[in-house]
Amino acid sequence: MLRLLAVDDELPALEELAYLLRQDVRVEQVLTASDGVAALQDMVQMIGAGERLDGVFLDIEMPGLSGLDLARLVGGFPSPPKLVFVTAHERCAVQAFELEAVDYLLKPVRAERLSEAVRRLQAAAVPVVDPGHDDVIPVELGGITRFVPQQAIWFAEAKGDYVRLHTVDGSYLVRMSLAALERRWAEAGFIRVHRSTLVSSRHVSEMRFEGGRVTLTVGTETLKVSRRHSRQVREQLVHQHRGG
């Protein structure tokens, strides 16, 4: 799931772009900034707080700090977000791609063209994981290190600075954040169903709708899906189980 920043000094264009991005099931969050200086401040603050930013949808002609100038500054970050330029002008395309932009959109932005830009950004932002490789989490148990394979994990549950991994053989507490685990297993079929719960889609045997809420049967457990994540979870599970 992508965390994005949209930057445009024209408010109607910014609101429309943010709205379209938020409709995409691959997008977790869309932040907005109305000029280059505000965008730079937001990015510096996010980096300082250790927050992830996967991509920036960036207008070019803005007062104070242009999109191209902002892109040059962003390129100096330790782990810069990927860039997609959104502009009414074709003339800056060469400069944009020299700055390693993953796409260049012309206004007015069409939904299907924006969807393709998100696909390109996701491919560039998320490292490719070999599906034949099964990640392993080392767990310390009274002086013994047990290696818990990713494919054995039903779901992971946040517990403060720790994560509890639930499997058919029991549960294991490891010191790491749920957000870090979500990024690590983004391409392995693990989906966020609650702010404190990450589920392996391969172990979901049933999805049920009760009183407007969604619940999942995962292994032998029944888990509630938060209202915030319901739509994304339904669409992702249906898509995966159709072989899409």
Image (cartoon, rainbow, N blue to C red):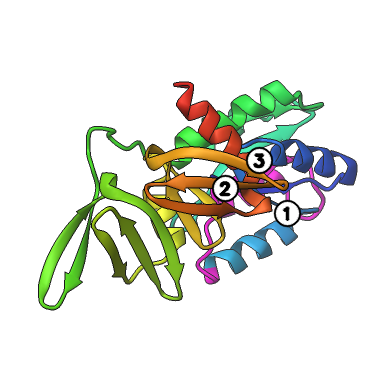
Instruction: Name the residue beneath numbered marker 2.
Output: 215
* Front in this rendered view, residue 85 or 1: 1
- Work out whether 142 lies above or below 220: below
- The residue carrying mark 1 is 36
Q: For marks 2 and 3, give the one nearer the viewer.
A: 2
Seen in the image, is 153 located left or right of residue 159? left
| Tag nearer the camera, 2 or 1 | 2
- Disc 1 crowd, CA 10 A, few/some/many (<14, 14-19, 20+): many
Kind of residue at badge 2: Thr
Circle number at residue 231: 3
User: Which quarter of the figure has residue 42?
Assistant: bottom right
Q: Quadrant of residue 119?
A: top right
Q: Is residue 89 above or below residue 138?
A: above
- Which residue corresponds to the image point at 51% horizontal and 36% vertical from the top-left? 122
Q: Residue furthest bottom?
A: 142
> Could you tell me if the residues under marks 2 and 1 are in contact, i.e. CB atoms within 8 Å?
no
Classify residue 178 as left or right of residue 36: left
What kind of element bears circle 1?
Answer: helix
Locate the N terminus and report the quarter of the image it occupies.
top right
Residue 28 is situated, as x and y percent measured from the top left of the image, at 61, 48
Left or right of 55 on screen, residue 148: left
Q: Secondary structure at mark 3?
A: helix
